[in-house]
Structure formats: structure tokens, C-alpha cells
Amino acid sequence: MTSYFEIYYTNLFVNESGLVKEIAGRLETYLMNRRAFIKLIAVSGALLVASRKLFPSKKDLPFQVVDYHVHPCDRFPREQVKARSEELGIPFGTVPHPAPRYGKISTDEDLIDYVEQTHALGLYAGLQPVNPGWHEMFLERARSCLDYVLMDALEIPDGEGGYHITWRDNFELPWETSKFMDRYLDFYENVIANEKIQILASPTFLPRCIRDEYEELWTAERMNRIIKSAVENGVALEINSGYQIPDAKFVELAKRKGAKFSFGTNSWRAHRAGNLTYSIDIAKSCDLKASDIFTLNKGSHDKAKSSQSS
Ligand SMILES: [Zn+2]
């Protein structure tokens, strides 16, 4: 029974049609085992009801829902990203990593090709650089074709040409915790002020080794350093459904200071793309309005208008 539950729990955050497809596939497998079949029907029914509650209707919301943080890759090609966006009726923006470390886009021509191909599918064309100074790789003329740039502060330069890669599960703090937080916040401010971005992804992320200390470590003072910098530089703060951050306290503080918010899943697979349950729940609990939500300039909407059918 536990294994069924795990299977369905994993898929619960897919939308209803995804869940139904998954159930149909499982039914075939278990048809020969009557006892398993009965259990499966019971679990499926309960979870279908639960999924209705977990995936709120966009119609009830006072703001537009867009997933700006979708990663196309070999196992989730752009055509599937488009299909998933249409299936959910939620516009998507893709954010490949440019070269050199995680992606291939390295020239102006690469960047313009990517933007054109993405717009042709009716998707927004974003970029998620990782290396500070990424913009020097491209001329302003090429960068201006992008709809937006989204970047996080998860890979902190070590000053010797390498990086402290905080998202890796085995990452260990190179300094004691308060010194780490100071360096981390310095890097946030640098990313927000100097990296020519429109969205700060995954604000308040913590590496696994100190994640349990989120409430103690993210003091109002520390949160306000990120928020102040974001507001001053006109950078939106992502509410990330993948990592389920930041918390409502951060969003409340940022809202009061006039920050804008975007939604993102940081997804590399179809079943996660567009699953913005956490982002929407936080936005609702903080009573965010349309005026609090990041929007692209109008030209971007025209370029990718076919993705906004809902
Ligand atoms: Zn990402």
C-alpha cells in the first residue's frame, strides 16, 4: 500500500489529466490482481479529489499565472514544453543556461536563434545565467531579444575561479554559518545589482546542511537586504514551487516594500512544469494582487501570444 501511495504522491502535483493518464497506465498493470485493483481504485479516487484542491483554478485568481522557470532539455524538449503549457492553459517561459558550464548558448547568433525558435512555439524566451559577468558574452543587441533574464545566487564564486555550489546535496559550508550567510547575502546583492536580470530566482534558498534552520537564519534583517536590493534595482522576486521558497514572511515583508513577484517551478520534466501550487498558495495567503506580480513588457506578449490561450 505504501508503494502505491508513494507513486501517486509523486504524481499528485500533476494536474488532473496527468493524474488520470497515470492511473490508466497503472490499471493495466494491476488488472490481473483483484485485491491490488480495489486498493488502486480507492487510492486513485481519494487522490483525484485531493488534486482538485491542490491545483487551484486560475479563474479564481486576481493575477495572471505564468511559469517563468522551465528548463527545456533532451528529456523535456521545447515541443513538449509547449504541449504542457497548452495542456494546463498556463504560459511558460523557458530559461536555458548559457555556456560555459551548463549550457551551449555562447554567441549572439546562438542567443538570437534560441529566442526565435522559442517564440515560434509561443513560449517566452528567458535565460538563466549562472556565472557572474555572463552578459559580457553577448552584445546588447542580442541580449535585448530575450524576454527576461532570471538568475539565482546559488553558486557563489570562491574568488579562485571556482564556485561554492550550494544546491548540491553534499555541499558543506566552507565557513561557519554566520560568515556563510554574510558572504551569501553579499552575493545576492551583487547578482541583483550587477547581473542585468529581471527576476531573482529561488530567494532564501538554503543548502541542505542548514535547511532546517530556515526560520532562525532568515532573520528580517537578512531578508530585508535582499528585498531592499530587489526593489531598488527593479528586480522581481520568484516564488519558487520547486524548492517551496520563500516563505510567507518574506513575501509579506517584500510586498510591504513594494517588490514584485514572479512564479516558477525550476522544472526539467513535464509533470513538474506549471505545477505552481506552492507559489499560488503563498500569493493567496499574502493577498497578492495583479499589481504585485511581475509582467513582461508588451512586446513579449505579442511574440509569444499563442501560449496565452487561456
Ligand atoms: Zn533553474
Image (tube, grey):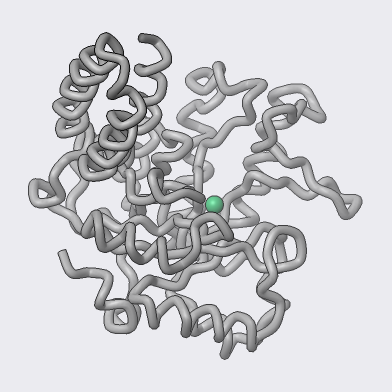
Q: Is residue 28 above or below residue 71?
A: above
Q: Nearer the viewer, residue 45 or 187?
A: 45
User: What residue sits 77% from the left and 41% below the top?
Assistant: 164
Left or right of residue 125: residue 253: left
Q: Give coordinates of residue 243: x percent, y percent.
A: 48, 36
Closest to the observer, 247 or 146: 146
Q: Name the outermost residue toward the front.
A: 32
* Viewport quadrant of the N terminus: top left
Q: Is residue 23 above or below residue 3?
A: below
Question: What is the tally of numbered marks visible in this picture?
Answer: 0
Specify whether residue 252 is in view: no
Is residue 8 among the parts visible in the rendering?
yes
Left-right relation of 86 to 204: left
Residue for point 57% across, 23% down: 211
Of the pair 257 and 63, the residue shown nearer to us: 63
Residue 80 sits in quarter: bottom left
Q: Give the answer, above or below, for where 30 lies relative to 269.
A: above
Q: Quadrant of residue 20?
A: top left
Q: Is residue 232 left or right of residue 98?
A: left
Provide residue 265's location: percent of width, then percent of height: 42, 47
> Which corner quadrant holds the C terminus?
bottom left
What percent of the width, then of the height, locates residue 195? 61, 65
Residue 230 relative to residue 288: left or right:
right
The residue located at (17%, 40%) in the rendering is: 56
